Amino acid sequence: MDYEEIFNMSYWRVFGTAVGENPFAETMYGQFLGHPEIAAKFAQSNPSKPMEMLRLSVTLAASYYFHRKPEHLLAKFAVMHSRSRLGIEPHLYRHWLDSVLQAVKTHDPACDENVLEAWRRILTPAIEFMQSKYDT
């Protein structure tokens, strides 16, 4: 099974080429902030900023998988999310992934178990990278 191709096709179905507001990002944002620990972390932030960052986070995570190394911005985010900065605990990344998968289910008309598995496989290495930098 070519999970990379499945992911790429799904990615374009949910994000398309539109710039600005995106129903996928809005669903992901709503799911993500539905978790009490995450909502508390974002309570003081500008509501538009986290939504932009969530969309960017998916793109950076996919880039990490395809390039096998962190882009400068992902490495910067890892430091920013570490214990000494924002304190985003490693277990919270599971909720990020769950939010992404729920948005895929909602917005990809071709979503099935293979599509969800493709998203998991592509995004998990970046999650593991972010978690590994928590204590830096």
Image: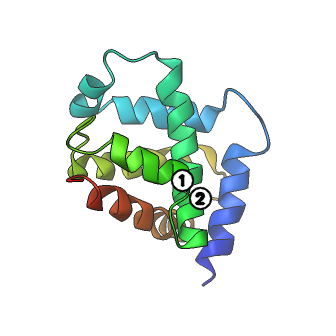
**Mark linked to residue 72:** 1
Residue 34 position by quadrant: top left
Can residue 42 be seen from the camera position used here?
yes
Q: Position of residue 36 (x, y in %)?
A: 22, 29
Q: Is disc 2 placed on a helix, strand or loop?
A: loop
Task: Give me the C-alpha separation between circle 1 and circle 2.
Answer: 31 Å
Q: On the picture, is 16 further left or further right than 3? A: right
Q: Residue at x 51, y 46 (%)?
A: 57
Q: Taking 55 as reference, is 26 above or below it?
A: above
Mark 2, residue position: 111
- For the residue pair 19 and 135, the one nearer the viewer reads as 135
Amino acid on which the number 1 mark rests in the picture: His
Q: Position of residue 3 (x, y in %)?
A: 59, 76
Amino acid on which the number 2 mark rests in the picture: Cys
Q: Taking 60 as reference, is 49 above or below it?
A: above
Q: Position of residue 94 (x, y in %)?
A: 30, 52
Q: Residue at x 41, y 65 (%)?
A: 124
Dot in front, 1 or 2: 1
